[in-house]
Amino acid sequence: MKLRRMKSILVICLLISMLPMKVTYASEISGVFRPMTEYTMSTYQSLNISSSGLASGSVKVNGYPDIVKSISIYMYLEQYVNNSWQTVSSWSDSASSYTLTLSGSAQVSSGYKYRIKASYYVSNGTLTEHLTKYSEEKTY
């Protein structure tokens, strides 16, 4: 009887482990509660387009000072054309720091929507966390 019960429990556990699940998590590192990301504290993405069509993008990432050893940022100026986003300019930078800001400018054509896409790579020296964030869309 005990063996049958044990087999039943094992089968139930196996079935539950096979269910699709979306996992979100929080962690406690160095005694500080950090929701959703292990190394990234905050990000910022902005896009401004002047009346003459100069698009200026700026992105920033802040990691946890006690954990983060290096950061890389890839920033893309994207244009919405033919029902999809296309990259029209890009910039990148890296630093051995827990915070990094990147800015760039490019001339854009009128009659389109634009946005900034930022890919952040935040590392503790061993593992790297990747986040992709977007600015608000602007029409010029």
Image: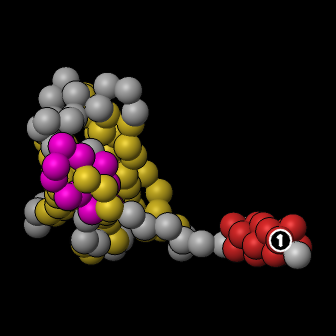
Residue indicated by mark 1: 2
Q: Is residue 9 left or right of residue 43?
A: right
Q: Residues within 10 Å of mark 1 (few under 14, many from 20)?
A: few
Looking at the rendering, the stretch of residues picked out in magenta corresponds to 29-38
Q: Quadrant of residue 24?
A: bottom left
Spot occupied by residue 135 in the image (x, y as percentages of width and height): 25, 65
Q: Tell me if residue 51 comes above or below residue 32 in the rendering.
A: below
Helix, strand or loop under label 1? helix
Residue drawn at (40%, 33%) of the image: 127
Q: Amino acid at mark 1?
A: Lys
Q: Quadrant of residue 112?
A: bottom left
Q: Nearer the viewer, residue 131 or 108?
A: 131
Q: Tell me if residue 74 comes above or below residue 117 in the rendering.
A: above
Spot occupied by residue 7 in the image (x, y as percentages of width and height): 85, 68
Q: Quadrant of the C terminus?
A: bottom left
Asked whether 35 falls inside the magenta stretch, the response is yes
Residue drawn at (25%, 53%) of the image: 28
